[in-house]
Image: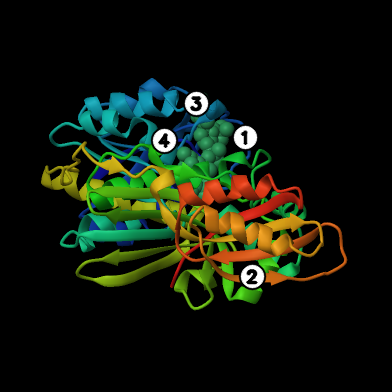
Amino acid sequence: MDVVKIGLLGLGNVGSGVWKILNDNSDEIATKVGARLEIARVLVHNPDKQRRVSVPRGVLTTDAEGVVSDPDIPIIVEAIGCPGQDTTLARDYMLSALRAGKHVITANKEVLARHGRELRSAVTDGGGLYYEGAVAGGIPVVKVFKEALAGNRVLSIMGIINGTTNYILTRMSQEGSDFEEVLRMAQALGYAEQDPASDVDGHDAAYKLALLASIAFGHDIQVEDVFREGISRIKLEDLCYAAELGYAVKLLAIARRDGDSVELAVHPTMIPHGHPLASVGGAFNAVFIRGDAVGDLMLYGMGAGMMPTGSAVAADCIDAAHNLIRRVSPPREVRSNHVRVKPMDEMESRYYVRVLVVDRPGVMAAIASEFGRAQVSIESLIQKGRGQDPVSVVFVTHRACERHMQDALRGIRALDVVHSIASVIRVEAD
Ligand SMILES: NC(=O)c1ccc[n+]([C@@H]2O[C@H](COP(=O)([O-])OP(=O)(O)OC[C@H]3O[C@@H](n4cnc5c(N)ncnc54)[C@H](OP(=O)(O)O)[C@@H]3O)[C@@H](O)[C@H]2O)c1
């Protein structure tokens, strides 16, 4: 049987998963591919480090160039990530492998979101770029858009595509704990990074949304096109009010067609308890898709971790080996550059607004009048805890334009009976 050699760059979480899957399941994979997949070289930073998988010493190397440019290695898996928050190293290794006609596999959403166009244009005939693991880890969402839904016009995508923030929001609502407390716990358990900004501020979800929306809509979408708001300002009190109103709060990544424009946003969102995304708890991910032909579809699973992400990357290795043996490239990704990204202030939503006010007669009327002036109509309101100072008053609005809402919030903030606007959360209709 033929042997197809693979060069693995990185042996951390993802690299170790790929090593384990390709070795543990090597016989089944060889039968499927018609050739043995052999990880011939593994690039690491520190060869003396204790590993989760047992790799022969002679296979480990610190010589990146020796792996990437080895003519006997036609498949390169990039799993080094962005050391020092820099995408340069991963980008450079991938570019030189692609230019040498190789098949390159990555789970690195940041390098794809920042350098995707350059990387795609470096793919030569006979080579290919694969990135199933880059969005939602073990959930095969990239292939679903590229293959299973290829005949659809995708209308919208709503995703819980960051496990850390979903874990934090789930624990907050289940245990009645504050954001900071749950974040500390998540860090201690290894669910959140010591520097959690990429997850909690929504950067990670924005990279993934830019990738998914580019495939789904066939446009070249940049991460800067995605409006982004994180979860660090969400208070336990908001989750309690949301539950009372019949909603769960999730960090949603949303991409939606609207005529010739697309809406792209990552923000905390209240979704009705009856919506399939509302029950996605803990570190799980889910992607809810609406296509013109297929209707509604939801994919659910583990969005990160050594084995789930390893599963997606291993599948890409198998695809690449198939293509290599048949001497074909994967289908080219067609992207039209012209798409209008709807500016945030044109977007429409319902809103949950919690205002801290002085408990005094006439306060509600003053706030309602500011909403009315800005053409935002109120659907419901809740006031509890009379006699406290300040006291929370919660408004849920009908659908309103973001620009009008910001106008209303400016007016409300300026009222002398208003202490502050504690929270504003967008509300998805069912
Ligand atoms: N972790 C997940 O669940 C997950 C899920 C989806 C996507 N991803 C993406 O997959 C990529 C890898 O993530 P990871 O969690 O596996 O990262 P990781 O655990 O930090 O592993 C990185 C690996 O790269 C090696 N490395 C780093 N800098 C290097 C350098 N300058 N030269 C040579 N080797 C170097 C490290 O070597 P040493 O081991 O010797 O230090 C380590 O083996 C990232 O882009 C990430 O966003 C991860």
- The answer for how far apart the CA atoms under marks 1 and 3 are is 22 Å
Q: Nearer the viewer, mark 4 or mark 1?
A: 4
Q: Which residue is mark 1?
A: 49
* Labelled pair 1, 3 in contact (Cβ < 8 Å): no
Q: Which residue is mark 2?
A: 381
Q: Which residue is mark 3?
A: 86
**Which percent across, then down, holds residue 310?**
44, 52
413 or 64: nearer the eye?
A: 413
Mark 2 is surrounded, within 10 Å at the Cα level, by few (under 14), some (14 to 19) or many (20 or more) other residues, namely: some
Q: Which residue is mark 4?
A: 224
Q: Quadrant of residue 168?
A: bottom right
- Name the quarter where the C terminus is drawn: bottom left
Horizontal side, residue 419 vs residue 286: left or right: right
Residue at (19% x, 62% y) in the render: 152
Q: Nearer the viewer, mark 2 or mark 3?
A: 2
- The answer for how far apart the CA atoms under marks 1 and 2 are is 58 Å
- The answer for how far apart the CA atoms under marks 2 and 4 are is 35 Å
Horizontal side, residue 140 vs residue 81: left or right: left
